[in-house]
Amino acid sequence: MEDLTKGSIPKHIVKMAVPIAIGMLVQTCYLLIDLYFVGGLGEQSLGGVSAAANLSMFILALTQMLNVSTGTLIAHAVGRKDQKDANVVFNQSLMVSLVMVLVTLLLGYGFAHDYMNIMSLDARVRAEGITYLYYVMPSLALQFSLVAMSAAMRGAGIVKPAMLVQMLSLVVNIILTPILIDGWLTGYPMGVAGAGLSSTISVAFAVIVLWRYFAKFTQYVSVAPSAWKPKLQVIQKLLKIGFPAGAEFLLIFFNAAFVYWAIQGFGANATAAFGLGTRVLQAMMLPAMAVAFALPAVVGQNVGAKQALRVKQSFKWSVGMSIMLMCVVTACCFFAANSVVAFFTSETEVALIAVTYLTIICFNFVPSGIIFSCTGLFQGIGNTWPGLWSSTIRLVVFVTPLVWLTSQPNFYIEQVWYLSVATVLVQMTLNLYLVKGQFEKLGL
């Protein structure tokens, strides 16, 4: 257990943010590696995997319910020095995660066709996306167990073990992807099915290793199947904090789904370019996201210890770090978008659309960094509703004019990117206003 209620706040944030950033980079690399090798199979395969991979945002939204609530409640317990409560929260979270693994598999395989029918008009794109989903679905389901264990560690101020396990799983994925997609060594190329299967094997490996870590070493919290009997009061606490956080991420999924719907008339090239651009965007957002993901543990422990001033100082440090990092990333994206996109595709039309997307959307970086920090503060305090309200308003402000634009005869794809930038600025402003209200409740 790491005590985050004492010592240098920026040091605590950086110490946690670096391993978190590496872990998040590993997660992003799963998709980037798939896109790199799938890109060689053609634009329909790339478009299918890109559209199907957007479903990972939906799963991420569901896992956030456990991720945020488990980390926050354990951080509060650690701040109060209440190890018994922390252990109860962890085991209840783990029990819920196992239930969600089964639910995800049932729903995922049951609605894969319906999902891809919505995402694309191109029959080949739909077919490739469905094949990919069939093989990658177990990896998406296993994210629940992975998140429950990682969140417990993060709430206790421990992040390195989870990061190391994720790095090992990435190595497994790097080795397996070309073997399964292109048939290296085996002579049996599986195409997009291989991309999904390599991710599934890699995530299963990570879950097994992390589970063994909990079982072998004594932790502040530990796996105790005897404590898996449902406790309604604890589950309600998990949902109270986790539901708004999960719903907020679900809105991100719907936002991307609306974009796919709006641009499908521009063809498979546009679908592939947006999918590619989105994955690159996620990778470039990692520095600010890592800082923001470190914030809930720092804030949470200080909330539990009733140190309100350190809560406010933690937020200010997070915002400052995010702005500095995102200014650098914005400049890199604006001037080097061509080089980045060229690494993943040789399709001229796909590359052109993706580069245009990145050079416009990069102006979202700084506002998004501030939004991430606001969300991290809400999570650490244990009130995630403000973040959900601001995300809901942003989605409405984005979708309403988007639907109107698609009905216009002079609609062009860049309008979607400009609209995104404008609405993110609206969300940032609203978030800062809501943060002010949270500080007032803390007496600051």
Image (cartoon, rainbow, N blue to C red):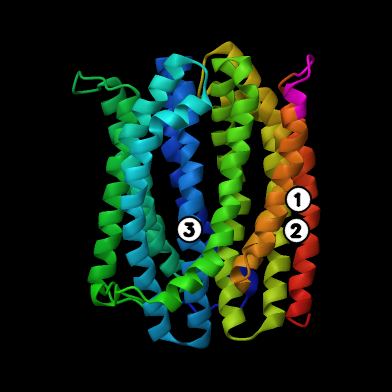
Question: Label 3, label 2: how many angstroms apart (C-alpha)?
Answer: 27 Å
Question: Label 1, label 2: how many angstroms apart (C-alpha)?
Answer: 6 Å
Q: Which amino acid type is shown beneath numbered disc 2? A: Asn
Q: Are marks 1 and 3 in contact (CB under 8 Å)?
A: no
**Which residue occupies the extreme left position in the image?**
186
The residue at which mark 3 appears reads as 19
Element under label 1?
Answer: helix
The residue at which mark 2 appears reads as 431
Is 330 on the left or on the right of 40, as rendered? right
Please say whether residue 127 is one of the residues in the magenta stretch. Answer: no
Residue 348 placement (x, y as % from top left): 58, 12
Name which residue lies at 58% across and 72% down: 298
Residue 110 placement (x, y as % from top left): 35, 37
Q: Quadrant of the C terminus?
A: bottom right
Q: Magenta region: which residues?
A: 404-411
Q: Which mark is residue 427?
A: 1
**Circle 3 Cα neighbour tier, 10 Å, few/some/many (<14 / 14–19 / ≥20):** many
Is 344 on the left or on the right of 172, as rendered? right
